[in-house]
Image (spheres, grey):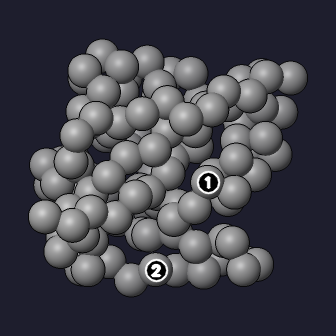
Amino acid sequence: MSVGTLYRPMGQKELDLVAASGWKRLPPRLPEQPIFYPVTNLAYARQISLEWNVPAKGIGHVVRFDVDADYLKRFTVQNVGGPIHDELWVPAEELEEFNDHIVGHIVLEETHHK
């Protein structure tokens, strides 16, 4: 099976939920968050962590995870700005199915502080 590697910037509460899952699942979205948007590269995830999570929450984390590449084909890469700003838009109601296609464990890649 081939995999695609994705990244997700997140705050401490979200990271705690990932850890509580045994590093196997991403937590459900909040009602006001209709889209789950993992990003396709570490540079973009790092930028979000440093520019949004750290100023807002004092800490930001970046996790990395692999997903079955055949499953990922159902999502179109969305560019939301510059050359590195590529992400997938996964409807919140599909996140459980998305989690079922994660291969291996979610890995804490980086932590950033104020």
Secondary structure of residue under mark 2: strand
**Could you say which quadrant of the image residue 54 lies in?**
top right
Which residue is drawn at the image coordinates 74% and 28% (left, top)?
112
Which residue lies under the disc numbered 2? 77
Q: Is residue 58 left or right of 78 when viewed as pictured?
A: right
State whether residue 88 is above or below residue 108: below
- Residue 93 x %, y %: 23, 57
**Residue 111: numbered disc:** none
Of residues 50 and 108, which is closer to you in this image? 108
Q: Residue at x 32, y 52 (%)?
A: 66
In the rendered structure, are the residues bearing label 2 and label 1 in contact, judged by CB atoms less than 8 Å apart? no
Q: Inspect the image, locate mark 2, and give the three-letter code of the amino acid beneath it.
A: Val
Of residues 42 and 99, the one drawn nearer to the viewer in this rendering: 42
Whether residue 80 sits left or right of residue 64 in the image: it is right
Residue 11: % across, % down: 59, 29
Mark 2 / mark 1, whichever is N-terminal? 1
Q: What element does badge 1 sit on?
A: helix
Q: Does residue 59 lie above or below 107 as drawn?
A: above
The kind of residue tagged 1 is: Leu
Q: CA distance from mark 2 to mark 1?
A: 15 Å
**Which quadrant of the figure contains the C terminus?**
top right
In the picture of the structure, the residue carrying the numbered disc 1 is 42
- What residue is drawn where x is 46% and y is 80%? 77
Q: Is residue 37 left or right of residue 22?
A: right
Asked if 65 appears above or below 1 in the picture, the reply is above
**In front: mark 2 or mark 1?**
1
Q: Tell me where residue 98 appears, x and y as whole percent.
A: 22, 56
Q: Quadrant of residue 101?
A: bottom left
Q: Is residue 10 visible?
A: no
Residue 64, x across and y down, in percent: 45, 44
Asked if 97 appears above or below 90 in the picture, the reply is above
